Amino acid sequence: MAEAAGVLYAVEHLVEGGLALAKGIYDPTLPLKATIKPVTDVNLPRVHHSISEVKGRAYVFGGKTNDDELADNAMHMIILPSSGIESTDYQRLEPTSASPPARYGHSTAVIDDQIYIFGGSDANGLLNENGRVWVFNTDTNSWSSLDPAEGDVPTPRTFAAASASAQPQPEHQRTDEDVAPQLPPDPAKMVPEPLAPSTYGTFVVFGGIVEDEDRATAELWTFDIASRTWSQLPSPPATHIADTSPSITFHSNRLYLVCRASTHYLDLSFTSPSYKDSQTTGPAPLSPWCYLPSDKPALPPTREGSAALIPITTGQGRNYLLHITPAILSSLQLSSSATTAASLKDRARDAISKKNATNEWAEVRYFTAEGVMIQEAQPNRGIGGRTGFSASKVQEIDGGCVFVWGGVVDGKVRGDGLMIEVEK
């Protein structure tokens, strides 16, 4: 009797497992669910500023304030909610003689614990700093600057899109190299030393408004941090991109560019130098720009940095790009990571001729912090029509979490933010 019960139990769970597997294969991967939580316990009105998240802290720099005046050049740190703590905290880091001048419309990206800043304008117009890149070290809360070693540099610009890659990095040299073979290796000495800050990686700047006559450009520039060298890469073929508010981001070694309904990407090659070789001068394109056909809804033209593009994941190898604009939040499904549950599902769907959603766009479904879905005719969908906002991925939270701060709604500069958690 017990044996029969055991067989029935096994059969029951086998059937349940089969049903769950079938459901997993047939369940769509789009649209995503976005839970939007207001952050109102810090008041810092900003527009055309930058925000960069590092280790659970969001660093706000520059921008304009309520009276359309240039903000100070202090670094404002918003300590984000963590497990067990639902409120945020705030700290102002006073400027020093090494701090960059106040500015707005600048370009910002993060590599590990360093925040890189380029360009922007002050009260007198575009800042001409001869290609200088400013660096804020979040470990020491200190500023430094990187001046180009040689070669051409980008012309002054504002509202350019920016991203960064931690590549190229020097190949780690084994610390037991050249040790006499008769001596036993010490495992503690085989661990390579961590790389020094601002000695590796690539800072990328695209587009922006150049010259005082408000002319937009479609130039793509990379700054190789190790060699302090700017290099210009081919521009994307769509010339109308220069007339709108583009956004860029990296996923692996692929640079994505999204502008209104257009999606382009460029595959790059990063040559990692060894400690004994000369340093590189930046990435090289592996092929021309590629256009990704899609039915992404066309958005009205926007200027002045009113868009953000952020790579996210919903787990199990499923990768997306989240495009944030004043009007809507939409996500692009990317190829799944190899040898993951997501890749197995995609292969299973291909085997049964069931199309998967790779390279497709879809608007997210909006939910309040209480879990109530926000319908199409209801207010507070997306980021509430904010323009001139800034957004950053929250690296300390697994999956897809984005922090949005500031912006303008109905002519008023916002001093609050939004925490957007994206999941399937």
Image (spheres, helix red, strand yellow):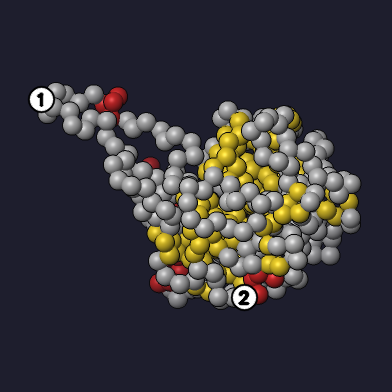
Is residue 52 among what the camera can see? yes
> Image height check: is 330 above or below 165?
below
> Image height check: is 172 above or below 167?
above
Circle 1 residue: 182
Q: Earlier in the sequence, mark 1 or mark 2?
A: 1
Give the residue at x 73% y 51%: 121
Give the residue at x 70% y 73%: 298
Place residue 81 in its image quadrant.
top right
Image spot of residue 156 (x, y percent): 65, 56
**Image quadrant occupied by the N terminus:** top left
Other-residue count near label 1 (Cα within 10 Å), few / some / many at <14 / 14–19 / ≥20: few
Image spot of residue 205 (x, y percent): 58, 57
- Residue 239: image tag: 2
- Residue 70: image tag: none
* Residue found at the far left of this picture: 182
- Residues at circles 1 and 2 in contact by the CB criterion of under 8 Å: no
Give the residue at x 55% y 75%: 237
Q: Amino acid at mark 1?
A: Gln
Secondary element under disc 2, as helix, strand or loop, is: helix
Residue closest to the eye, 407 or 403: 407
Image spot of residue 202 (x, y percent): 49, 50
Secondary element under disc 1, as helix, strand or loop, is: loop
In the picture, measured across the screen, residue 87 lies left or right of residue 149, that is: right
In the picture, measured across the screen, residue 254 lies left or right of residue 114, that is: left
For the residues carrying marks 1 and 2, which lies nearer the camera in this image?
2
> Image height check: is 304 above or below 315?
below
Is residue 324 among what the camera can see? no
Q: Amino acid at mark 2?
A: Thr
**Image quadrant occupied by the C terminus:** bottom right
Image spot of residue 255 (x, y percent): 51, 61
Give the residue at x 62% y 72%: 262
Separation (CA) of disc 1 from disc 2? 64 Å
